[in-house]
Image (tube, helix red, strand yellow):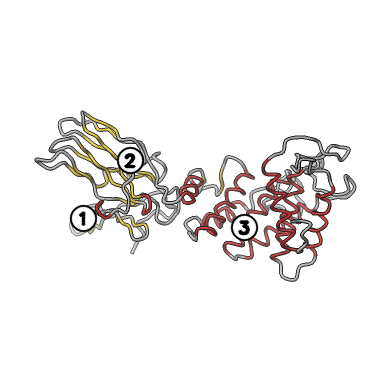
Amino acid sequence: MYNVTDPVGHRRGWVRACADAAGVTCTDWFRPRVCDGTACDGADPATAARDERPVPATTLYGRTISLHMDQANGLAWGVVENGGAGDEIWLDRSWDEGASWPEGSSLGRTSVPSGSASTRTAMFATRDPRGLLYGGAVRACGRESAHQDGSCTAWARPAPTRARGAADALMASYRTDEGWWRSSWWNSAVALTSLSDFARSTGRHDYDWVIARTFEQNKGVFPAGGRSSDPVEGHFISRAVDDAAWWAIAWVAAYDQTGERRYLDEAVTITDYVRGFWDTGTCGGGVWWNRERTYKNAVTSGLYLWLTSALHQRLSGDTVWGARAVTAGDWYLGSGLINGSGLVNDGLTSGCANNGQTVWSYNQGLAIGGFTELWRSTGNTRYL
């Protein structure tokens, strides 16, 4: 037996059987049905739980061509109305948001029967059932019987829940060949954390494979601050200390989701690297923003506070990281980073005073998250 699905999930394959007996003879080509849970290609629209129209209809020679969806079950069908006998309706299905659909064109193609003005296709699954790419996209297309040209609606993707819709949209820009999101290295860490949170909060594991792929593709890619002798060479480390720390948070979340110790070990390795940029010689503590040690700011110190507290909670019998978390929390409260309005400014001046710069939203979140984790670790309501 042979797998008829592209293992990276890019395409649904076609297969046929052939034999060579005084000349090659083959069966017709066949593409297997796509099923998503209990819903499969070919289902009757009458069984749909919902009938939603996610995009506007299109018109062609007075005909109305519309796309219908049962978003809860990830199914779609097309309808042609105000037509005549021989008019056609079909669906196109794409696994890359409409960039290509050579194996997903003309699905359910059907004609308006004699004496009728409308017809519809069967229903087709719109999501990649193995969660290997983007969740799929579909459009409805039609042709008037007397003309060869056709017209299609816009592409639409299902959003059975807001969380699933968001996860699918996030995965639309994931590079399966490179194992990350190209927009930004540290943003990739945050995106990966979001997918772990998605699985934890919804119980869906469509994108759990992304955790392992990102880890395995990139663990040996990034240099550790430019020194070939650095003991963390090849891990998720960079000269921007906060960027590395976002990856440590991602691997803590991955460990919580999967239980695989390698992710927690990676988080420890990265956090230990971040700890190397904590010193008391300037401003009495805090973490430097970059390898050049030019700036002490809220993001690196907030990340370090969260990570030390989180590691303490996950490493059985730990006292070392717990003590570091208390030191980091106490320093943060007395550092001046929190202004008179109770908001965290960007960082400290060279004279170790609040620099009055932007109160970035993620710095507020890191402070809230970090002190919440420290309270959980210590029970000390001062931090809460």
Say what amino acid the circle numbered 3 marks: Ala
The residues bearing labels 2 and 3 have C-alpha atoms spaced at a distance of 36 Å
Left/right placement of residue 304 relative to residue 56 reads right
How far apart in space, not on screen, are marks 1 and 2 (Cα)? Answer: 30 Å
Question: In the image, which is nearer the foreground, mark 1 or mark 2?
Answer: 2
Q: How crowded is mark 3: few (under 14 residues within 10 Å), some or many (20 or more)?
A: many
Tag in front: 3 or 1: 3
> Residue at the left extreme?
115
> How far across and how far down the image is residue 349, in percent?
84, 37
Q: Mark 3 points at which residue?
A: 253
Q: Where is residue 149 in the image (x, y as percent from the top left)?
A: 23, 30
Q: How crowded is mark 2: few (under 14 residues within 10 Å), some or many (20 or more)?
A: many
Residue marked by disc 2: 139
* Pick the front one: 117 or 88: 117
Which part of the image, by quadrant, shows the C terminus? bottom right
Q: Tell me if residue 73 comes above or below residue 354 in the rendering.
A: below
Q: Do the residues labelled 1 and 2 touch (CB within 8 Å)?
A: no
**Res 151 → quadrant:** top left
